[in-house]
Image (cartoon, grey):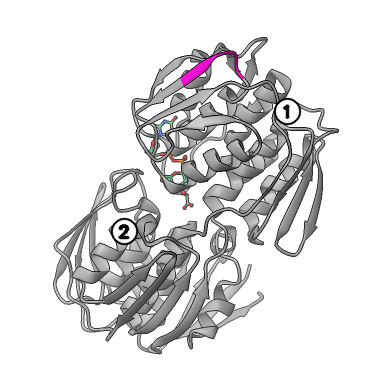
Amino acid sequence: MDKFIIDGGEKLYGKITAQSAKNTVLPLLAAAVLTDEQVKIRGVPTINDVENMLHILREVGCRIERQKDVAVIDSSNAVSHEIPARLTKELRSSVFMLGSVLTRFHRAKISYPGGCDIGLRPIDLHLSGLKRLGVKIVEKDGYIDCLAEKLTGAEILLDFPSVGATENIILAAVKADGVTVIRNAAKEPEIVDLQNFLNAMGANVRGAGGGTIVVEGVKRLHGVDYQPIGDRIEAGTYLIATASCGGEIEINGVPSENIAALLHKLRENGCKIRAKNDRIVLSSDGRLQSVDLLETMPFPGFPTDMQAQYSALCCTAAGTTLVVENLFETRYRYAAELKRMGADITVRGRTALIRGVEALHGACVTASDLRGGAALVVAALKAEGQSTVLDLSHIDRGYADFEEKLRKLGAKIRRVRV
Ligand code: EPZ
């Protein structure tokens, strides 16, 4: 397992172009099986979650061509409706395959994805939505077996604006008979990107980004050549690191409205931020004021995927911050590791009370999930002295060229293979 060695205390200066958004590329790859024509997706980051999704596509019979950061998927020979269990364990997002495989084969079998490091991650909203479209679902021996002789449009109301459930229902509705209306749908930018991708394939999806999405079933979908949106979570991670360490960073490829909630908080912390179209410039003296409260919410609220990284910044901001994590049950596993670096964090259930300290000191810490691992790197870049961050497999799931991009900004970070 690789580790990072980080010598903290450096200010960060430079420019970063965001990778294509992991949480867009994954559903787009699942959507590639909706047509038997060629699908080309550009700017595809080399991260483990993407490689695992490409592996799943190969397992169902797709031919994949990977040229640098482009993925070309030919699913004309796709034959299997079964997603192998070992891959579902690896990658929760494989559950997105349900909707698209059902549309292609009218059958789909997947092992129950189960929970992960940040919570139970149920899929009841996915399944109840699919049932509304006429899918018969048998859950047995840890498998979910779906049969849909006919997919018929329906009115669906989501109890919670689940990103994955919204995406899965759209993928199952794009070629259904009639119209599907999804109310209380997730509003994330990645849903808008999925809508644009599907419409470029000849689908008829409207309303993404708002709470109600209308999908009019079409007969056929054709191939597409598509550039997904930039990764707002990756961009936010670099903005938070620069805000905390001090310096100046220019991020390209992410529209500022896609991370408005984070920019609002960082301005409250005392950062100077200029944003125009998809160019964001942040400067910070590294001596931040804390905000009293941070609550994670579905989009356009503060994203849960930036809670850990932002909490790391709060550890050395002057004052106290109360963090409330409303999306996932156990998204504070990084807190114990930050305490090893001298952070003053008290976690109770879904809340964390963070009292800013003068400085963090280097320590040997272990990542336990993707964004928690990124938070440990943010803290180590700020800390006095040397830190080691172990178990990079989590970080490698979502950040392409992480240490290279940070080194380009002036960070003293290197990867050691162990
Ligand atoms: C997506 O996960 C993202 N993953 C997550 O990013 C992100 O944290 C999450 O949306 C929220 O924004 C991808 O897009 C691949 P949800 P997803 O369904 O779809 C509950 C990262 O770090 N829920 O919106 O799984 C669920 O328990 C990852 O990049 C149900 O109760 O999230 C959670 O409390 C982590 N029943 C809440 O909804 C369901 O059927 C939000 O989950 C589905 C979800």
Question: Quadrant location of residue 37?
Answer: top right
- Whether disc 1's CB lies below 8 Å from ligand 1 is answered no
Q: Is residue 195 magenta?
A: no
Measured in 3D between alpha carbons, the distance from the residue under mark 1 to the one under mark 2, in whole angstroms, is 40 Å
What amino acid type is highlighted by mark number 1? Glu
- Which residue is nearer to you in this view: 180 or 142? 180
**Disc nearest the viewer among 1 and 2:** 2
Asked whether residue 201 is in view, the answer is: yes
Tag of residue 371: none
Q: Residue at x 64, y 56 (%)?
A: 48
Give x and y (percent) for residue 130.
53, 19
Question: Quadrant location of residue 357?
Answer: bottom left
- Which residue is nearer to you in this view: 97 or 278? 278
Quadrant where ligand 1 appears? top left
Q: Main secondary structure of the magenta part?
A: loop
Q: Residue at x 59, y 13 (%)?
A: 177
Say what secondary structure mark 2 lies in: helix
Where does the magenta region start and end?
176-180
